[in-house]
Image (cartoon, helix red, strand yellow):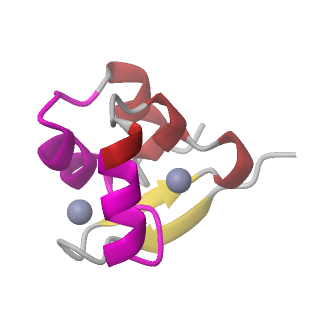
Amino acid sequence: MKRRIPKTCERCQQTFICGLFGCWCGDMPVTDQQYGEIVERYHECLCPACLSDLSGHPIPANVLKLSSPLIDQ
Ligand SMILES: [Zn+2]
Ligand SMILES: [Zn+2]
C-alpha cells in the first residue's frame, strides 16, 4: 500500500507529498546536524526545495519525482 500524504511546507507554503515511512526526505543530502535544526524549527517535513536550500545541495531526481503532487504514480 502506498501512503503518500499531501502536505504544505511550513517554510514556503508549497504543496508536496510526504511518503511517511518510505519518505523521500531520507534520500535528501541533509546532514544529521542540519536535520536536527530543521526538526527544532518545523513540525513536519519540509518540501524538497527548502531541504535543498537548507542543505546547500540540489534536489536528487528521484526525490523530485516522489515528492511532486503533480505526478500520480
Ligand atoms: Zn518549502
Ligand atoms: Zn518526509
Counting from the top left corner in percent of width and height, residue 26 is at 53, 36
Region rendered in magenta: 34-59
Q: What's the residue at 49%, 56% (across, down)?
A: 17
**Is the N terminus in the top left, top right, bottom left or bottom right quadrant?**
top right
**Is the C terminus in the top left, top right, bottom left or bottom right quadrant?**
top right
Tell whether 1 sits left or right of 8. Answer: right
> Mostly what secondary structure, the magenta segment?
helix
Tell whether 70 sits left or right of 14. Answer: right
Q: Nearer the viewer, residue 23 or 15?
A: 23
Q: Quick check: 21 above or below 6?
A: above
Magenta stretch contains residue 67: no
Q: Nearer the viewer, residue 70 or 16?
A: 16
Counting from the top left corner in percent of width and height, residue 9 is at 32, 71
Determine if residue 71 is in view: no
Q: Quick check: 2 above or below 17?
A: above
Q: Quick check: 38 above or below 56?
A: below
In the displayed orientation, state which residue is furthest to the front: 33
Q: What's the residue at 13%, 46% (across, down)?
A: 53
Determine if residue 70 is in view: yes
Tell whether 48 sits left or right of 53. Answer: right
The quadrant where residue 39 appears: bottom left
Q: What's the residue at 25%, 68% (across, down)?
A: 14
Q: Quick check: 55 above or below 13?
A: above
Tell whether 50 sits left or right of 42. Answer: left
